[in-house]
Structures are given as C-alpha cells and as structure tokens.
Amino acid sequence: MIIKKFVIVSVALFLACTQLYSQDKEKTVVAQKGEGIYTLLRKFDMSPSKYYSDFIAINKDNLRNGKHLYEGRTYIIPDRLIKVDGKEALPAIVNGYPIFGKKYATVEQKSTKLKGAVYYLISGHGGPDPGAVTKYGKKLISEDEYAYDITLRLGRELIAHGALVYIIIRDENDGIRDEKLLMVDYDEVCYPNKVIPLNQVERLKQRVDAVNDLYIKNKGKYQRLIVTHIDSRSVGQNIDVFFYHHEKSSNGKRLAESIHKTFDDKYKEYQPNRDYTGTFLDRSGLYLVKNTMPAMAYIEIGNIQNKKDQKRILVPENRQALAKWISEGVLLDHKKNN
C-alpha cells in the first residue's frame, strides 16, 4: 500500500495576516412585551445600524417572520466590535475571511458549540510538492489542490460554530473554488508565511513546528489537529474515506472514531444499499502523527487514480459534503469531551 499524503485537520480558524477575533462571555437578554431588536441593542449601548444584521444572523431561528421578537424568549446579543492593533475588527458573528475567496469570505454563525475550541488544519503537500497527481482527460489534477479546497471548506464550517481555526498550509489567492478542475500551482506557504521547502523531512518538520508553537501559545485551551490527504493507489482500487490516529492518544482516537462514525451514518442514510468500508487505525509512525502535540485525526479522502474516487473530489458539491461530514464528526467529538 502506498500512502502518498495526509492532511491534519483541526477545527478553529486563525488567519495569519488578517485580524484576530476574540469573543467575550456570551450576553443574553429576555425580550419584554413591546420590545423590538432596536430596543434590545440600545439596552447594551449598541448602535442598531451597526449590529442589527448581526443580531438577525445569530438569532434567526428564534424570530417571528425573520425580524420580530417573541415576548419572554431569550436572545443572544452579538459581540461588540473590538480593537485589534488600534483598528476596528469585524464582529465575531459575521467575519471577513479573505482566505476563503470573495464568494465565501463572509461566515455567518450557526452556533457557539465550538466556542473556546482551537483547531489546526493541515492539507497535504503544497508549495513545490503537489503530492499525488494524475490526468483527468488532458488536464493534470493534484492532491494538494483538492485537499486544500476541502480543508478550507472544513475550516469555514468550524468557524460557523464558533471555533478558532488555524489554516497551516495556505494559498492566499486560491480561496474556495467551485470548479471541477482546480489549476495546479506551487505558491502555497506554511503558517504564518514561510516558503515550503522541497525536502520532505524539512517540509514535514516545518508543519510540525508551526502547529506545536501555536499549541504552546494556546496552552489550556481545547485543541485538536486535522490533517487531510488524498491517496494514490492502483487505478482499479476504489477506497472509502479512512482515518489515522496516534496509538497512545485516547483523544485522537476518539476524534478519528467520531468522524468515522459520522461517515458510517451518512453512508447508511444516503447510500443504504452499500456498506461503508472506511477504517480508523493507529499510524503512530507517520511523521506528523508522531511529532505533533495536539490530539489529531489524519484523513485520507480517496484514491486520486480511481475513477469513482475522483468523483468524490472533482465535484465541488461532493467536496462540500465531505467538509460538512467531517465537521459534524468534529462536533460529535467535542460534545463527548464537554
């Protein structure tokens, strides 16, 4: 079996070279008879013109006709704009994340289930190394481009649930792409903005150092790592998504197992006529698994050489579904630990 690469996924987004967002303890208020959104915001000395849309976004499932309060119900007050380096940052409810690209830069909060959690996301290869490659028609497709797109989509899902996310391997001009064929380039960098070396050991060590340095800085917080790769095997070998963890990490095993269970459940729901054969196994010998500090799950998305597996990564809706399922597994894991 040839394992071409792996991606480490952790779910919370810190974007280097952009603003750092913080959240205070969540504020709530009970709506009284006759009160509207403007009234509630003014109770907290917050400008309705600035915070009205944020209030709607965070409370949208608790409003009548999408904009009216229910008397006696509890509502969440959005975070006030904060100062970062002397500049006003965006509120945590709807943030601007340029790394996701113009279309997906705005992230609306779905919940605060992952608030306080830190996730590190690593997509396999990048820079001078595109990872596993093959031809689709006359076009070259590579592991790093598709693993990166899935990783960005995952990061966006995690942020929507309140997590802090660090994208470790990053391409500032790609963003989330909805094309079937993603152009191969070599300009990815390692957090915060380091050129990725060609030497494999140096490349892996660079990623390990980036994650471990951040892990130490975030000491005391709930932290997880997720790595995402796409395998390369014989053309005829169709494989399901599978997972690795460190043998001695009970938290890593639980994370991998939670994502695995989510995939198993999804296959039963959407493909009831076939069994899900993906596994979660100990692979403590892998460099990233062995040397990174956070509990982690190492994900292999499929076989880039196989025509059936290619549909899993080439179709943008499928990449989004993969990211969504991984995020649901992450939420399940977090719930078990809190």
Image (tube, rainbow, N blue to C red):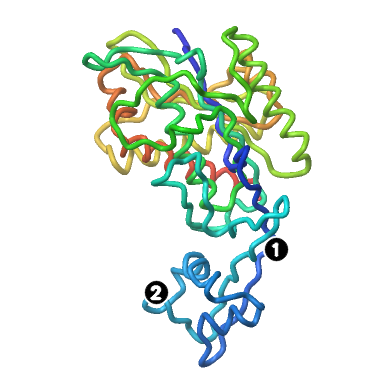
Instruction: State the residue at coordinates (52%, 25%).
Output: 7
Query: Looking at the image, can residue 278 be seen?
Result: no
Marked residue nearer the N-terminal end (2 or 1): 1
The x, y position of residue 53, in whole percent, is 48, 68
Q: According to the image, label 2 marks what residue?
A: 66
For the residue pair 169 and 267, the one nearer the viewer reads as 169
Residue 129 rendering spot, x and y as whole percentages: 49, 13
Q: Is residue 223 visible?
A: yes
Left or right relative to 303: residue 77 = right
**Mark 1 secondary-structure assignment:** loop
> Is 217 on the left-hand or right-hand side of 263?
right
| Residue at (61, 32) in percent of width and height | 225
Residue 287 vs 245, above or below: the answer is above
Q: Is residue 92 above or below residue 7?
A: below
Q: Residues within 10 Å of mark 2 (few under 14, many from 20)?
A: few
Return the residue at label 1.
Answer: 25
Q: Where is residue 85 shown, x and y percent of the image? A: 72, 50
Q: Secondary structure at mark 2?
A: loop
The Cα atoms of the two marked residues, 2 and 1, are separated by: 25 Å
